[in-house]
Amino acid sequence: MFNSTRTPGLRGGMAVLAGALAGGLTGLPAPAVERPPNLVIIFADDLGYGDLGCYGHPTIRTPNLDRMAAEGLRFTQFYAAASVCTPSRAGLMTGRYPVRSGMCSGKRRVLFPNSTGGLPASEITIAELLKTRGYVTQCIGKWHLGHLPQYQPTRNGFDHFLGLPYSNDMDRVPGAPRGRKAFLDPRIEYWNVPLIQDEKVIQRPADQNHLTRRYTREAVRFIRAHQDRPFFLYFAHTFPHVPLFASEQFHGRSRRGLFGDAVEELDWSVGRVLDTLRETGLDRRTLVFFTSDNGPWLIQGVQGGSAGLLREGKGSTWEGGMREPAIAWWPGRVRPGVCRALAATLDFLPTAAELAGAELPTDRVLDGVSLLPLLDGDGPPPRDSFIYYRGTEIYAARKGRYKAHFITRPAYGRSKPVRHDPPVLYDLERDPSEQYNVAAQHPDVIAEIRALVARHRATVKPVVNQLERTAKSAPRPAP
Amino acid sequence: MFNSTRTPGLRGGMAVLAGALAGGLTGLPAPAVERPPNLVIIFADDLGYGDLGCYGHPTIRTPNLDRMAAEGLRFTQFYAAASVCTPSRAGLMTGRYPVRSGMCSGKRRVLFPNSTGGLPASEITIAELLKTRGYVTQCIGKWHLGHLPQYQPTRNGFDHFLGLPYSNDMDRVPGAPRGRKAFLDPRIEYWNVPLIQDEKVIQRPADQNHLTRRYTREAVRFIRAHQDRPFFLYFAHTFPHVPLFASEQFHGRSRRGLFGDAVEELDWSVGRVLDTLRETGLDRRTLVFFTSDNGPWLIQGVQGGSAGLLREGKGSTWEGGMREPAIAWWPGRVRPGVCRALAATLDFLPTAAELAGAELPTDRVLDGVSLLPLLDGDGPPPRDSFIYYRGTEIYAARKGRYKAHFITRPAYGRSKPVRHDPPVLYDLERDPSEQYNVAAQHPDVIAEIRALVARHRATVKPVVNQLERTAKSAPRPAP
């Protein structure tokens, strides 16, 4: 299953080796050659491109993420693998477009409590890959890749799990306010969402007011407990997905209202994680990535976020649906700056493999590329294209600065897809808000993008659709 | 004309005095007690809220402004005095809403080459005020407050002037492409705009390709030449107003196209000014303010900028028309951070007066307030409200977080104004994109804003409208 012909981890390994040599020459203690760096992925839920201070929001205060951006590498063209939750997470976790794992559908766009599907055991997750290199692995927060026992994080390479099996707005109890009314003045008892530790429900309904705090405490504990072994922490926050909750310290504090409260507590949490890494001295051997699963859920009104200058939001293949704030942080390794190259959550798995010196699987197509050339600032941008799926269909594709929309459709509602032939073409670097169709001027670019899509399609094989597998009545998450 | 009862400059004076005492006690050379600080205002033209890296633009590179923001105070709720050029500049220069000087009109929204009006001699400009304290004063760039001899910068408190009398798209020559076509592939010979030194035309048409560079050279020269006297530099860039030009070094360099080229050269220019202050050691005795005259000119397509997450642009009383990027910089005095309090270009004059220890006029209404409490971070926000004029009419008003629109209208075109009674009300801190009308929930807020507007109206006296004064044929700028 794993490739032994290429030499993954060369760059990471070389850097460590160089460090050891330099240490020896200067008389300083040499870092251990064998120990690969830690990886922390912090993943927000429904956070938009425009929702952080360092991405231009006027009233949400995010001093910790702003500092992370100032000390790290802030991306401006970074993509989630899909515009909604389940497929986005499947893409992140496997380094493959979710169409390959069957984790996307045009009919049921995410997993629901009555779903019986989940991430197939045949898929290799980042956690499973890092396990081959002796990593300690922990999943905290929202999973949403299957809630039956066989799909849980602990069956996908994670030693431990503390979090929710799916979104915090699922499992609404009978009698709770209907529709979006329940989000205006949300109460935890409106939803019967379970909090799970490893494979056991420990609280139901989960106390959402204190979820960010609880997650954070667990993350800090995990980091402190593993100062002597390489670790992978996947910290997938529940917020700012509606219903919005925040602890007493943050509730009512933000000028931006409840949405701001949730984001500001998330920001606090990021600060706690980074501070813990600093305090333990692990900051110089840990790559931390922050991003979000998809764009802002605009139909939620002021309870939803903002895509800034990008068009549309969650659920859409316009930029606002899939382009995300993203920050890489690793003091001493990642040079502070702004990165305008293309990158995606699909790239986390190959990046992790290269850093850890783990072998990539060769029996399957990977869609990700290692981001180390961008992080180290010493190589050409590794990614030149991106495919925008809605469910199992390709709606758009980007090559270089140009994006062609073959199909467009409002993010939600009953409107039918509109097919474009020739496709609508935008120059995203000149026209980031996708306002001015330049298809007529660039038939050559359209031909190139068509060829790119055809090559991609040829690699996609039919698989069981996991999101369309359902039970008549909702099965309970185990046990 | 000048007030002698209040004690302007107390804060600034005290700070200098404290510095002198501290210097004496530590044995370091004490700064001269008597010398007030320098003031530099850098003013962009048609730059939108979303057009800088530090305000979230994904592809425009502004490392110098980003550094200025990191070292200084970045404002997120900062307003130009109007949504178009001439009234905006009149407000900045006088500290008064332009309706008080007659420098706004609903019919002719700015001055044109055939205008015969201009800023009345009775108005007191920042330059005139600072002259009373012995400042050397220089105006560089676009003036647009009257081009007949009696209105030029040199008649308004500036020792010297180098720049254009009005916008760079005026004076179009017969035979040049019509409408917006001329902006797509602009050539300097399409426009007969004069470059003026003091009161003399020195180049016509102005070489717009090298205008930013020429302005910048003059700014650097001015700063270097006045290291021993307090100075005021008003540096009002011609760009990124269309037609867009950039020097060879910047042309074709930006991923954002020609608009990005112009902004990136502007950014370079800001860097040159700040570097010159650093090199001369004047950085610690100079307040530099950067902002823009109004929002992005959206009807110019990719040749226009972006208001980021704000609604609409130039010409409009929606936030995108008047809320601007704004950065205050003064190493050692202004503490780095983000300021979310209200502020406006109207506040520059009172701020300058307090810093310089100049007396404010008492024979007229001033609409500005000193921003020193924000810059020093030691007092309550001095501004709680803002009035949004279109021409001579009040379209909207803000009090605290709420903004009421009494009239709305598209920025350009023939659409008639739509009057709202009750007004449309937005919570700008919770809903910065002005999407969700909350008028029904806040009749008390509407009553407060109506009272605020009534109090304001009672202070506005009829004056000669300067923008509606025209000649049959365009008079030439002097001589």
Image (cartoon, coloured by chain):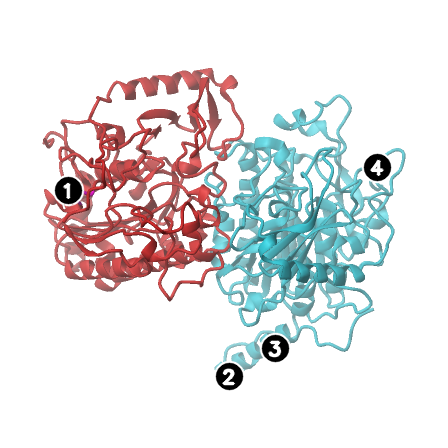
Chain colours: A cyan, B red
The residue tagged with tag 4: helix, strand or loop? loop
Lower sequence index among marks 2 and 3: 3
Chain of the residue on which disc 3 is drawn: A
Residue indicated by mark 4? A114
Residue indicated by mark 2? A25
Q: Is residue B113 left or right of residue B267?
A: left
Chain of the residue on which disc 1 is drawn: B
Residue found at the far right of this picture: A472
Query: Which of pointers 2 and 4 indicates the residue nearer the eye?
Result: 4
Residue indicated by mark 3? A14
Q: Is residue B439 above or below residue A446?
A: above
Are the numbered discs 2 and 3 placed on the same chain, yes or no?
A: yes
CA separation, marks 4 and 1? Answer: 74 Å
CA separation, marks 4 and 3? Answer: 48 Å
Which amino acid is tagged 3?
Met
The residue tagged with tag 2: helix, strand or loop? helix
The residue tagged with tag 1: helix, strand or loop? loop
Residue contact between numbered discs 2 and 4, judged by CB atoms under 8 Å: no
Query: As rendered, which of B386 and B152 lies closer to the eye?
Result: B152
